[in-house]
Image (tube, rainbow, N blue to C red):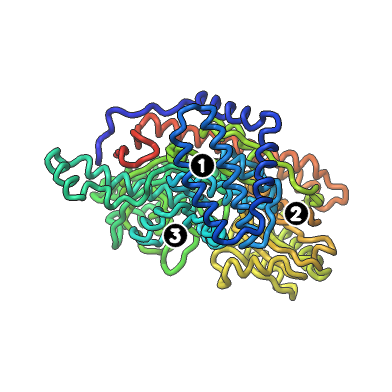
Amino acid sequence: MIGFLQNFVETKSVKDHLVAAHQKQRQLDSPDRIASLLSQVKDVSRTLRGVSAADLLDHGHRLRRMSVTAERTSKQASANDQRDALLVLALAGMVESVRQHLSLEMFDTQVSGAICVAQGAVVEMQTGEGKTLSAAAAAFAKSIDGQGVHVATPSAYLANRDQSRMERVFAALGATVSVINDADAAADRRDAYAADITYAAGHVFGFDYLRDQVALGDAVHLELGDRTLARLSGHDGSESRLQRGLSVAIVDEIDQVLIDDAVSPLLLSSSETGEASDACIHAEAMRWSDRLLNGRDFTVSNGNAIDLTDVGYHDAYENTAAVVHPKLKRPWHDYVVLALRAKYCYRSNVHYIVRDGQLHLLDSSTGRIHPDRSWSGGLHQAIQMREGLTVEPESQPIARITRQRFFRNYAFVGGMTGTADGCRHELGSVYGLPVVCLPTRTATKRTILPTHLSKTRSEKCNAIAHDAIKLADQGRAVLIGTLSISASWEVAAAIVERGSVCQVLNGVQDEDEASVIAKAGRRGCITVATNMAGRGTDILVDPAVVAIGGLHVIVVEHHSLARVDRQLIGRGARCGDPGTARFYVSADDDLIVNDAPWIARSIQRYAHRERQDRQAIDEAIRQAQHQFQRRQTSQRMRLLRADHDDEKLWNVDASSPRGCIQL
């Protein structure tokens, strides 16, 4: 274990970050600033319109030379003017390159979004407004100084999609672009980081940062003579470094990457092969837990917290053989609690899947599978035992960092999402980021139909299947969003039982994700999807479908976070097209059972009445979601405070890993 760094830079306080956010906000809100820069971009882009490939490439090269000159400018006012001029020229170049290579004209809202992101803001742009192009334009503008730009996305799928789409656009301006996936070798990662712009899922950048700290930290703690010899021979750790530094991060779907995913830290660990030495204890704990009664021996709260009662605690310690077992890694009653959590709090195809004898975690916000992740503290092993799998040894932590601290290590952060406004305070207080909400190009034509109430999940599933088939028979395209893989299969089965067909997108389907999405907007198509389809997914709706009402989105169950619901219904009625959406609620939904059980009585009362009191129930659900979000915010702030208190990973120079050390 590497020791603490003695002299570290104090982390900015919440107040400091809020002040920084307010200062940026005032600058962005200053009269006509964004409009003036937008006008200049449009003027310059008109002069570039139709230029040859050689001239466009030369434009990009000249920007890099000008950037070097601007860095040498000493006067602040002059430097600011030069930075604005470079931003205008860079975005104008992107406008023309997009036109030439994607046959698209960037809208004013897209250029305005890029301007704000390139100045360190979080931009809220509604779904369908073209966030991908805005993020790419901002990334190019920040890349011209040669420091390297990291474009962080919520998933590998989106990173690969966006990098592939933008590669020709960047290349036309002389910028190199790459993408990193979890399975990439170290040499390939190093090459990818050498590019001007690097795309990857957000966690990839964080784990590679930790890998660099481990390598550099090992070198730092050599004896002085060995360290000097290593430096002279070129083996001081820098030769294995993956990243050039943490200079610029442009974050797509920034509320998910910086907030939703920040409830748990990034933990780099090593693992052994074979069976865990305490597998027999997990087996005994599972057998023992099956004897315990809910309410008498233990209680379940908040969906995944289990506490033994005094009776349960004493009963557990009647198993004297397990209490003194030589392979114990934690107190015996902790094994019992883990076994109870595996039984009562975690469900297959909801929280995880079993594939090829392995336990793979599911992302609760997106439904995506993460085979490289595992639960800590013995929980992963308890669930493996419950599923009849080989109980693997627990991973040994090597390094950790909270996502908040990691992204605050970047010299510059900007980003965008369709759901930022509700996170304004946290983005400001934790990251010093202001939020700018841009209007849509055209008025939305989305219609939210009245909430459908059912007494049970089964009853709700039948209603969804009936409504989806009816709409598909009329020629509409229907997207049905679920919170879990098991729910997607349940709805799909109900549709098939009625003699209809549907396609399924849940991470374990046989068909490629892009292929499923490509069909989702076709006439009469029903697509059942987990929240994989909720963020960053562009469903192109056939003109024939638009003519009869557009895409209809069915929300099978409210997510605990209202922002996730907004992202899902945002798949329809994009760019001025018509569309409809409807929420379906049953009294036994997880949100109702875990966070608002009092609503269940009202749902039971009004479920089959013609005049359902939906507004009161909708408001109660919004309040439950608001309370859940507050609890999540508190959890993230506790994690951040603990990170400060424990000094988990201190950084001398945030823009360069050379000065970092970790424990």
Q: How far apart in space, not on screen, are marks 2 and 3 (Cα)?
A: 31 Å
Tell me the residue at 58%/72% (across/down).
Answer: 511
Q: Quarter-wise, where is residue 371 in the image?
A: bottom left
Quadrant of the image containing the N terminus: top left
Q: How dense is the environment of label 1, judged by Cα within 10 Å: few (below 14), some, or many (20 and up)?
A: some
Q: Quarter-wise, where is residue 246 in the image?
A: top left
Q: Is residue 599 left or right of residue 205?
A: right
Q: Is residue 162 visible?
A: no
Q: Secondary structure at mark 2?
A: loop
Q: Work out whether mark 1 precedes mark 3 in sequence or the reverse, and give the earlier one.
A: 3
Q: How dense is the environment of label 2, judged by Cα within 10 Å: few (below 14), some, or many (20 and up)?
A: some
In this view, the mark in front (1 or 3)? 3
Label 2 near label 1: C-beta < 8 Å?
A: no
Label 3 near label 2: C-beta < 8 Å?
A: no
The residue most toward the left is 225
Tell me the residue at 52%/23% (across/down).
Answer: 15
Residue ID for mark 3: 181
Looking at the rendered structure, the kind of residue marked 2 is Cys
User: Is 474 or 627 nearer to us in this picture?
Assistant: 474
Above/below status of 528 relative to 406: below
Residue ID for mark 2: 575
Residue ID for mark 1: 299
Q: Is residue 573 left or right of residue 510?
A: right
Q: Secondary structure at mark 3?
A: loop
Q: Residue 278, percent across and down? A: 30, 54
Q: How far apart in space, not on screen, are marks 1 and 2 (Cα)?
A: 49 Å
User: Is 567 or 578 nearer to us in this picture?
Assistant: 578
Q: Residue 475, percent across and down? A: 81, 69
The residue most toward the bottom is 499
Q: Secondary structure at mark 1?
A: strand
